[in-house]
Image: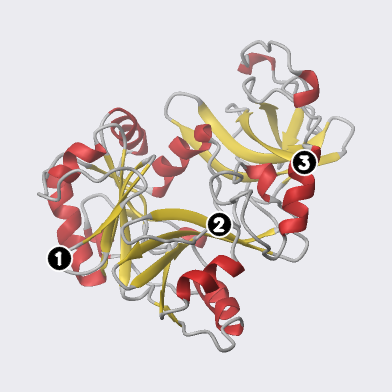
Amino acid sequence: MTTHTSALLTLPGAVAASGVDGGVAWHYGDPTVEQRRAEQGVGLVDRDQRGVITVIGADRHDWLNKLTSQLLLPLADGTTTQALVLTPQGHVEYHFGVTEVGDTTYLDTDAGTDEGLSKYLQMMKFWSDVEVTVRSNDFQQLSLIGPRASEVGARLGLGQVEAGCAVPLPEGGFLRATDTGLDFVVPHDRALTLAQQLIAGGATPVGTWADDALRIPTRRVRTGVDTDDRTIPHEVGLLGVAVHMNKGCYRGQETVARVANLGRPPRRLVMLNLDGTQDVLPNPGDDILTDQGRVVGRVGTVAIHYEDGPIALALVKRNIGPETPLLAGGVDARIDPADVAPENAAPASAIDRATFTKIRPR
C-alpha cells in the first residue's frame, strides 16, 4: 500500500486521521461546522489516501474493457466513469474511477488498493501493448463537494466542466466533474498551492470525519470499508454506476447477470441510526446481531452527523428491516426508515432514539 503524509496537514487546525485514511486530515478543528458548510456551500476534501494508476499503450481501451465490468469501448478523450474488477464468483475485488485524458487512462482507487490492482493488471498484460504504472506518489486528489463546488472551481479560470467529463490541467493531471462535485488530480508538489487557492475562493477544508458523515446518508460505499470479500455489486448500489449490463464477457459476469435477472441479492446496503447515549461507537467490520444473538450483517463506515447524530452504513440480510432492534458492535441500532426491506415495503415511522431497546447484555 502506498502511504505518505499530505501537505494539507499543515493547514490551520488539521488533525491527522488514522487507519486506512492515515496521512490526511480527520478534521480541521470543528467537524460539525465542516459538515454544515460542505452540505450548504462547498467543502474541500483531501483524498490523498486514494491511489492513482496510469495505463498507456495502443491496446489499453480494449484490454481494460475485457478485464472490467464497465463498457470502455469507445473511451473518448475527456470522459470519466467507474469500473470494477470482480472475482470469478462475481465478488467486488476492486472499485476505481476511470478517466481518459490525452494518451493516458487514469485509474483512481480506494485507499490501500492501488498496488493490488496494479499487480493484477500486470499479470493480465500478456502480449497487449499496455504499460501500467502506480503513480500514487506522483499525484494527489483534491475534491470540491457541495452545491457551490462548480462556482469555486470556475474562479480558477477553468470554465465549466460537464458531469462525466474531464479536462487536462496546465501543470499536469486533470479536473473532472462528477455527480458530487469536482475532483482535481494534480502533482503532489502542486496540491497545497491549489488547496490554498480553492480556500481563498470560498471552499472550507473538510476532513474525513465530515466527508464520511455526509456520504453515509447517500449510501455511497468505500471498497474495503463498506464491503467484504463476499460483496456483489447488486448489494451496494454499483449496478449502473460501475457495471454495464449489456457489454461482453468479463470475469464475474455470470453472477452479475444471474442475480440481476432473479433480483434477489442476499444482502442490502442500509443506513443505521445508532444509540448516541452510549460512549462508544462500532467499528467497520463489527458484526450486527439481533436480540436472539443471530449475526445478520456487518458494520461499514461510522460517523457522527451534525444533525442526525451517530450513523453508519451496513450490509444486512435482505429481509431485516427498520422494525428489527439490532446491536452493531455492541451498540443499539435501528435501520433507517428509508431502508425498508423489499419484502416489507410499508410506511415506517421515524426513529425515536428514546425507544432504543438496549438489548445488549448487562
Q: Which of the marked residues, 1 or 2, is nearer the chain's N terminus?
A: 2
Circle 1 is placed at which residue position? 170
Q: Which mark is residue 111?
A: none
Q: Which residue is more in the foreground, 344 or 244?
A: 244
Circle 3 is placed at which residue position? 261
Taking the spot 50% from the left edge, 24% from the top edge, the residue there is: 308
> Which numbered mark, 1 or 2, is in the foreground of this view?
2
Taking the spot 36% from the left edge, 39% from the top edge, the residue there is: 31
Relative to 204, 239 lies left or right: right
On screen, 199 above or below 213?
Answer: below
Circle 2 is placed at which residue position? 70
Q: Which of the marked residues, 3 or 1, is nearer the chain's N terminus?
A: 1
Taking the spot 49% from the left edge, 61% from the top edge, the residue there is: 72
Numbered disc 3: secondary structure: helix
Residue 329 x, y percent position in the rendering:
71, 42
Q: Which residue is more in the foreground, 33 or 61?
A: 61
